[in-house]
Amino acid sequence: MTVTTKQLIQWKQKGRSIVALTAYDYAIAQILDQAGVDLILVGDSLAMVALGYDTTLPVTLDEMIHHAKAVRRGVKQALIVVDLPFLTYQESIQQAIHSAGRILKETGAQAVKLEGGNEAIAQTISKLTSVGIPVMGHIGLTPQSVHQFGGYRKQGKTPDAKARILAEAVAVEEAGTFAMILEHIGADLAKEITEKVSIPTIGIGAGVYCDGQVLVINDVLGISDWQPPFAKSYVNLRENITQAVKEYSWEVRERKFPQPPS
């Protein structure tokens, strides 16, 4: 049975933790879905881990749609959420509706995600949800604002910063989001937000008290050449793949692969 946005809210009420991971292609998405992941996020992190950019800013809407379509073809059960990339929703509400509408129409994904919780973003979320587009929020460290933050720094360290993030969480919920990402904030603040809002919180570097957790799949599989301090690798595929390629290369050069006909 396909996971729905309403189901995530029901799981929060029941205390059932939500499992989320990113995916950017058919093969990985199919594996995650068959492994029982609840939510697959086609994150704009693909700019960095799949396309080789230094930040998430350069990825385009067309690129997000391209990758999301591949993910959709590999998924039968998980809820698919797609990031709205930088400058595809900030200019106007009309731009946001057009961008989000394209994602839902062209990819078959069930929801979009956008960053921030200020008044303008809350108004955008409210309009999107009013026309039937499910929206996931994202507060705390918002990577599209990396230059404003001066790097990928932990957020909510001061009382004022904590109060601002808490207010953004409330605004995002009131605007109609079905869930929100809490990224790189203190566990105490994440706990306060999780207890205050009625929608699920999905943490990434936000401690154990969130209603679920998400990580970048490249970090989980140990493919990345760098990963944030809050991530965890469950296998070192970078090392395994390197060894496999070296063995293949040696066999080809030594004419041991393919085997000669018997």
Image (tube, rainbow, N blue to C red):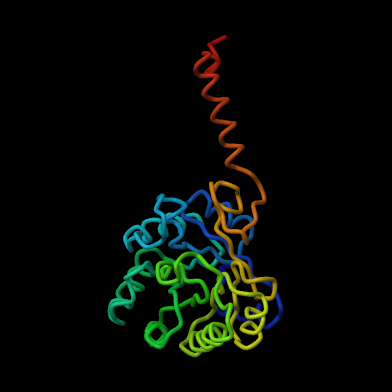
Q: Give the left or right position of residue 189, taking residue 179 as reference.
A: right
- Relative to residue 132, is residue 33 depicted above or below? above
Q: Give the left or right position of residue 51, taking residue 10 as reference.
A: left
**Is 259 or 47 nearer to us in this picture?**
47
- Relative to residue 249, is residue 88 depicted above or below? below
Q: Give the left or right position of residue 108, taking residue 249 as reference.
A: left
Where's residue 243, x and y in %? 59, 31
Q: Residue at x 54, y 20 (%)?
A: 250
Q: In which quarter of the view is residue 100 placed?
A: bottom left
Q: In which quarter of the view is residue 83 placed?
A: bottom left
Where's residue 61, x and y in %? 33, 63
**Is 176 or 92 nearer to us in this picture?**
92
Q: In which quarter of the view is residue 19 placed?
A: bottom right
Q: Residue at x 41, y 49 (%)?
A: 52
**Is 150 or 231 nearer to us in this picture?**
150
Q: Residue at x 55, y 27 (%)?
A: 246
Q: Residue at x 53, y 63 (%)?
A: 40
**Is 114 or 154 nearer to us in this picture?**
154
* Quadrant of the rendering where the C terminus is positioned: top right
Where's residue 51, x and y in %? 40, 50
- Relative to residue 150, is residue 129 depicted above or below? below
Where's residue 101, x and y in %? 34, 73
